[in-house]
Image (tube, rainbow, N blue to C red):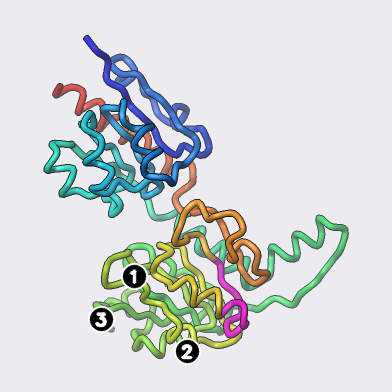
């Protein structure tokens, strides 16, 4: 009997086989782990053509209809997290491809958000670099207590970020399209209008799901409303912000800085302006890259693949 072929994609840290017990899958399938990322669609199709099962980590490798329809052998996709907007679910269903999902946790993204806020407020990258280079103090940080934290999107992550801001002694304000004053108050925030959110925030942190409605939600007009001393933080999805408009604002210093974990194209291309601006803190989409969520992701994915194999 021909063994099932399983591909594990974009395992950047080479930990997929360590963080879960794959025995229930390995007994019946051959597992191939790829540590690199492929941008080119033709190269991606060529790589994935031999596989019956593809395991994807969040949106690292999107699987749109144009890819799915070129993979006739594909029978199952295992995706980490409870949903994955980069998989064309309709195309998968039409081609009889089962999609399995996993649990997860938002704590690591909340924690990274605050790591970026604090790093931006206290210039930690520049100060650490100075010490490494033999220097000493190079800047004056900004105390957060008493300043305004603006939260764009007050869902599971945004609400936790807001409560921590309150604990820091910040005045927390929030807006999203469907947010009510009552929901905002439940997270310790004051509901304001969109323009007021951008105009008042000393730190503006973004926590929205990416959709047709939210793509480009922060553009040149919104950035122009912000204080020249403001810090913009994004740990959600890159396309929520008009990247060209953000680069222009950072170059002109109409906002003080940005702390970004997500980008329009990931991995961020070499030489991209966001890699070189001195008022940008950039991390490589590590909001969910932590021990607990990784263990949940991989263990649940193994279980989903094993259950699928049981039905074959």
Structural crowding at the residue carrying mark 2, measured as other residues with C-alpha within 10 Å and reported as few (<14), some (14–19) or many (≥20): some
Whichever of labels 2 and 3 marks the residue nearer the N terminus, that label is: 3
Q: Give the SS element for disc 3.
A: loop
Image spot of residue 35 (x, y percent) = 49, 35
Foreground disc of the pair 2, 3: 2
- Drawn side of residue 38 relative to residue 5, left or right: right
- Drawn side of residue 135 relative to residue 140, left or right: right
| Above or below, comparing residue 215 to residue 59 in the picture | below
Image spot of residue 116 (x, y percent) = 56, 64
Magenta-colored stretch includes residue 184 = no
Which residue is pictured at 37% across the width and 44% down the height?
Answer: 41
Image spot of residue 257 (x, y percent) = 60, 75
Q: Which residue is mark 2?
A: 225
On residue 180, which mark appears? 3
Image spot of residue 299 (x, y percent) = 35, 33
Region of the chain picked out in magenta, as a range: 249-259
Foreground disc of the pair 1, 2: 1
Give the quarter of the figure containing the C terminus: top left
Q: CA distance from mark 1 to mark 2?
A: 19 Å
Foreground disc of the pair 1, 3: 1
Q: Which residue is mark 1?
A: 215
- Foreground residue among 257 and 252: 252
- Drawn side of residue 37 relative to residue 189, left or right: right
């Amino acid at each position: 009997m021909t063994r099932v072929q399983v591909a594990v994609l974009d395992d950047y840290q080479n930990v997929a086989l360590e963080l879960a017990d794959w025995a229930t899958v390995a007994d019946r399938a051959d597992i191939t782990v790829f540590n690199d990322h492929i941008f080119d669609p033709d190269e991606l199709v060529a790589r994935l053509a031999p596989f019956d099962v593809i395991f994807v980590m969040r949106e690292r490798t999107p699987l749109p209809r144009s890819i799915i329809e070129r993979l006739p052998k594909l029978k199952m996709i295992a995706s980490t997290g409870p949903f994955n907007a980069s998989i064309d679910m309709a195309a998968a269903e039409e081609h009889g491809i089962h999609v399995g999902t996993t649990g997860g946790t938002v704590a690591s993204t909340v924690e990274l958000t605050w790591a970026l806020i604090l790093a931006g407020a206290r210039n930690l990258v520049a100060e650490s670099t100075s010490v490494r280079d033999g220097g000493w103090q190079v800047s004056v940080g900004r105390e957060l207590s008493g300043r305004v934290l603006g939260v764009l999107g007050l869902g599971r992550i945004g609400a936790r970020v807001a409560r921590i801001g309150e604990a820091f002694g910040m005045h927390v304000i929030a807006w999203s399209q469907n947010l009510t004053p009552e929901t905002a108050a439940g997270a310790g925030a004051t509901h304001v209008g969109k323009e007021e959110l951008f105009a008042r925030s000393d730190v503006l942190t973004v926590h929205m799901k990416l959709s047709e409605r939210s793509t480009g939600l922060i553009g040149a007009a919104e950035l122009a409303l912000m204080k020249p001393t403001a810090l913009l933080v994004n740990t959600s999805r890159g396309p929520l912000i008009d990247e060209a408009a953000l680069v222009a604002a950072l170059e002109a210093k109409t906002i003080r800085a940005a702390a970004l974990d997500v980008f329009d194209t990931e991995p961020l291309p070499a030489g991209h302006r966001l890699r070189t601006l001195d008022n940008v803190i950039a991390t490589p989409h590590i909001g969910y890259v932590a021990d607990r969520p990784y263990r949940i992701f991989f263990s649940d994915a193994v279980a989903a693949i094993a259950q699928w194999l049981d039905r074959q």
